[in-house]
Image: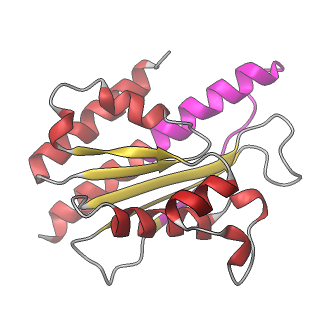
Amino acid sequence: MLTQQLTDAAAEVARLLAQRRMKLALAESCTAGLVAAALGGEPGISQWFCGSAVVYRTETKIAWLEVNPRGFSTPEPDSVGPQTSRGLVTALLAKTPEADLAAAVTGHLGPNAPLGLDGRCFGSVQTRRSPSREPRSVEWNFDAASDDPIQVRRHRQQQAAVRLLELVEEFLNDLRSEN
């Protein structure tokens, strides 16, 4: 079930995409398509939303988007880290010619996350309109809101999806102020 916070964030991103006349592509790992589901509920979004690659596993990131976290100069464990999220947005723009903007999220939301990665997520966003600009990347750390591991995971997925949409919103607003 989508939270009100998530649907509100999706509505705002949909409004900004239409206003800026920009098309968005996503790569979602830890959110498993939740961001796409929220955007997909917005009327008229098909004009501005290209789609989402749910690249949950390292092998899928490699096969679908040719992003190999093991091959980075500093390998990222379990394909979770800033290099992975930046690599995903760069690959999305290369593989989705109609997209003006790409965003990606990867992380570990528990339970059973590797040591030091529980609740950590990494998001990136980049535009084709400024190819020399590095992707904007952020890290989020989500605490456990419950003792129930299933509830913790679901809550963190919702939080990560909202944060990615907020990152896209911020990026779109910054683009407006640059023009």
**Residue 142 image offset from top left, x and y in percent:** 68, 41
* Horizontal arrangement in the rendering, residue 177 relative to residue 96 (left or right): left
Residue 147, magenta (yes or no): yes
Along the line of sight, the residue nearer the viewer: 58 or 139: 58
Along the line of sight, the residue nearer the viewer: 62 or 41: 62
Q: Is residue 35 above or below residue 19?
A: above
Stretch of the chain drawn in magenta: 137-164
The total of numbered circles placed on residues is 0
* Residue depicted at x 87% and y 38%: 112
**Residue 133 image offset from top left, x and y in percent:** 34, 79
* Horizontal arrangement in the rendering, residue 127 relative to residue 144 (left or right): left
Extreme-top residue of the structure: 1
Residue 120, magenta (yes or no): no
* Residue depicted at x 66% and y 63%: 81
- Identify the image quadrant of residue 13: top left
Extreme-front residue of the structure: 63
The colour scheme is: secondary structure
* Residue depicted at x 68% and y 56%: 58
* Horizontal arrangement in the rendering, residue 117 relative to residue 56 (left or right): right
- Identify the image quadrant of residue 145: top right
Along the line of sight, the residue nearer the viewer: 47 or 137: 47
Along the line of sight, the residue nearer the viewer: 56 or 172: 56
Quarter that holds the C terminus: bottom left
**Residue 67 image offset from top left, x and y in percent:** 58, 67
* Residue depicted at x 66% and y 49%: 107
**Residue 158 image offset from top left, x and y in percent:** 55, 30
